[in-house]
């Protein structure tokens, strides 16, 4: 295993960004690099800024989806925010092939995201300009024909579907 992504939290972001920018094939190659070194217990924890158990669980779930493997059970780590709960629901909906739940969860994630990105502490933070988890999951859902590209919200500024390959 190559730990060049340093930890599963960074791996999660790398897979999401790769889905958005390079598509499914490249995201699968990145997924093969996602993992945590054997000494990960030294930095994975509930209050860790490096990687939480929730980060790890979401990363491994997305990795399994990309590699056509069976994901581990979701929900072992409690969600740290509503947004993370919706992100988990998106991944579970993709795994279950549930179009209705996926679209509902995406709408809920985007509502939450729009409120959060307007909060004083996030207004100048560029990472809140695009809903990376929503766009990455949307690309994956379209690639699996769970939803059609025309079903994605067109007017959401934080979900610029035109950027996705």
Image (cartoon, rainbow, N blue to C red):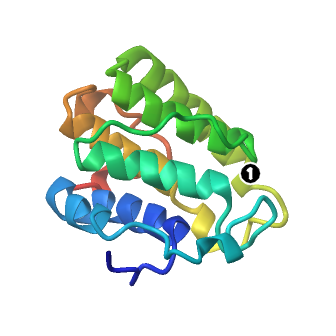
Q: Which residue shows up at 31% across the image and 43% down it? A: 65
- Location of the C terminus by quadrant is bottom left
Task: Give the image location of residue 39, x and y in percent.
Answer: 58, 77
* SS of the residue under disc 1: helix
Report whether 113 appears left or right of 19: right
Nearer to us in this view, 160 or 71: 71
Residue 21 seen in render: yes
Asked which quadrant contains residue 43, the reply is: bottom right
- Location of the N terminus by quadrant is bottom left
Query: Where is 98 relative to 7, above or below?
Result: above
Query: Where is 129 relative to 93, above or below?
Result: below
Asked which quadrant contains residue 84, the reply is: top right
Nearer to us in this view, 47 or 156: 47
Total tally of numbered discs in the picture: 1
Task: Give the image location of residue 153, x and y in percent.
Answer: 41, 34
Residue 158 seen in render: no
Direction bottom: furthest residue: 4
Report whether 87 appears left or right of 71: right
Query: Where is 146 relative to 13, above or below?
Result: above
Q: Which residue shows up at 76% across the image and 69% down it? A: 48
Q: Which residue shows up at 55% across the image and 41% down it? A: 87
Report whether 14 appears left or right of 164: right
Task: Give the image location of residue 160, x and y in percent.
Answer: 40, 52
- Crowdedness near tag 1: few (<14), some (14–19) or many (≥20) residues, C-alpha within 10 Å: some
Direction front: furthest residue: 38
Nearer to us in this view, 144 or 28: 28
**Residue pointed to by mark 1:** 116
Report whether 41 appears left or right of 81: left
Task: Give the image location of residue 107, x and y in percent.
Answer: 54, 30
Direction left: furthest residue: 25
């Amino acid at each position: 295993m190559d730990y060049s992504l340093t930890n599963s939290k960074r791996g999660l972001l790398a897979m999401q960004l790769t889905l958005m920018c390079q598509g499914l094939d490249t995201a699968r190659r990145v997924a093969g690099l996602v993992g945590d070194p054997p000494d990960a217990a030294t930095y994975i924890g509930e209050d860790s800024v490096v990687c939480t158990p929730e980060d790890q669980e979401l990363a491994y779930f997305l990795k399994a989806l990309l590699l056509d493997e069976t994901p581990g059970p979701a929900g072992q780590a409690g969600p740290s925010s509503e947004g993370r709960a919706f992100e988990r629901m998106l991944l579970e909906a993709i795994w279950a092939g549930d179009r209705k739940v996926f679209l509902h969860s995406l709408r809920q994630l985007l509502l939450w995201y729009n409120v959060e990105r307007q909060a004083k502490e996030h207004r100048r933070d560029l990472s809140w300009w695009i809903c990376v988890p929503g766009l990455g999951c949307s690309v994956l859902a379209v690639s699996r024909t769970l939803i059609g590209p025309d079903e994605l919200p067109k007017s959401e500024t934080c979900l610029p579907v035109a950027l996705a390959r």
